[in-house]
Image (tube, grey):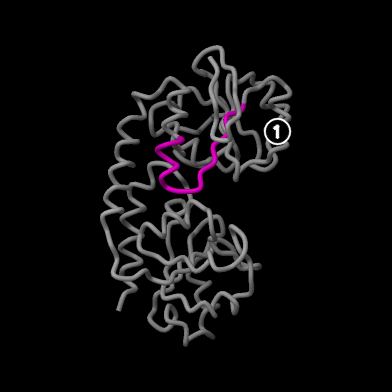
Amino acid sequence: MVVTDALGRRLELKRPPQRIVSLVPSLTEWLFDVGLGARVVAVTDYCIEPAAALTGIPRIRGTKNPDRAKIIALQPDLVIADQEENRERDVQALMAAGIPVYVTAIRSVADVPEQYGRLAAVLGGADAAATGLAALHAVLAEAAQRAPQRRIPTLAFIWRDPWMAVGAETYASDLLERCGADNLGRRLPGRYPRASLETFMRLQPEVILLPNEPYAFSERDLVAFAPYGDVPAVRDGRVLLCDGMMLTWPGLRAVRALRVFAEAIAGGER
């Protein structure tokens, strides 16, 4: 059968794949969430959920430096990658070795049920994925019904030294906007803009989110904001530690994330 991935690339598969290598931590989690985990024969070092189910599954290094020789030796029916998470050169090398690679391109919460639904069909797992996909559609509809009186100026950092924030055309930005945020990171250039903390603070956020991954922000990082007492988020105690995987991992986590972040952001309204 011939299938088309999110980048419009045509792949020829002999049958629904039974041996899958996942190069994307969130997609690894999703495969297990929808009951397709038994087909996974290798994952990256950063694939950490579901932890118990991943015990003993071979690791093929990181998302940006996968062990291509090990992947080829495993003879998978399909490798799953993402345009943001993985490098084009690795995708091309695996394809040249005769390994089909299906690439997703998640830029919004709405992309998740649409693209994961298509992937589930490719895997012959549409029925298994149906309940989770329906839950995603329902929570998206619920979020669309919320009409905040005004959007709350919000910054969500993902790194420190250098300081980096969630910017335009990213899954996390779209999630925050659906939760009532005015993502100030979109005002700076780049999908993940980097700047001095002072530059970010000039944007006058009313809510600041510090996720625990990919950078492990914790209580010790709050002191960095002490010099900016005139910034509303600092003045009002709205510098919030949060779950990084809930913010940045596409998948069924979005069902809870759209509610949790809506509550957190709305709490900044005075």
Residue at the spot 59% in from the left edge and 59% down from the top edge: 192
Callout 1 environment at 10 Å: few (<14), some (14 to 19), or many (20+)? some
Give how far across and how far down residue 132 sits, in percent.
33, 36
**Residue 246 or residue 148, whichever sits in front:** 148
Give how far across and how far down residue 59 sits, in percent.
61, 33
The answer to whether residue 34 is left or right of residue 4 is: left
Residue at the spot 26% in from the left edge and 50% down from the top edge: 142
The answer to whether residue 74 is left or right of residue 137 is: right
Kind of element beneath mark 1 = loop
Q: Is residue 265 above or below residue 226?
A: above
Can the viewer see residue 69?
A: yes
Instruction: Name the residue type under label 1.
Output: Asp
Question: Is 105 included in the stretch rendered in magenta?
Answer: yes
Give how far across and how far down residue 223 sits, in percent.
52, 78
**Residue 151 or residue 79, whichever sits in front:** 151
Based on the displayed image, in which of its 4 quarters is residue 90 positioned?
top right
Give how far across and how far down residue 108 sits, in percent.
46, 48
Q: Is residue 109 above or below residue 24?
A: below
Residue at the spot 59% in from the left edge and 57% down from the top edge: 191
The answer to whether residue 57 is left or right of residue 148 is: right
Query: Which residues lie in the magenta part?
Result: 101-115
Residue at the limit of the structure toward the top, as seen here: 14
The answer to whether residue 57 is left or right of residue 38 is: right
Question: Is 73 included in the stretch rendered in magenta?
Answer: no
Quarter containing the C terminus: bottom left
**Residue 111 or residue 124, whichever sits in front:** 111
Can the viewer see residue 43?
A: no
- How many numbered discs sit on the rendered protein? 1
Question: Which residue is label 1 attached to?
Answer: 67
Residue at the limit of the structure toward the front, as seen here: 8
Residue at the spot 49% in from the left edge and 37% down from the top edge: 27
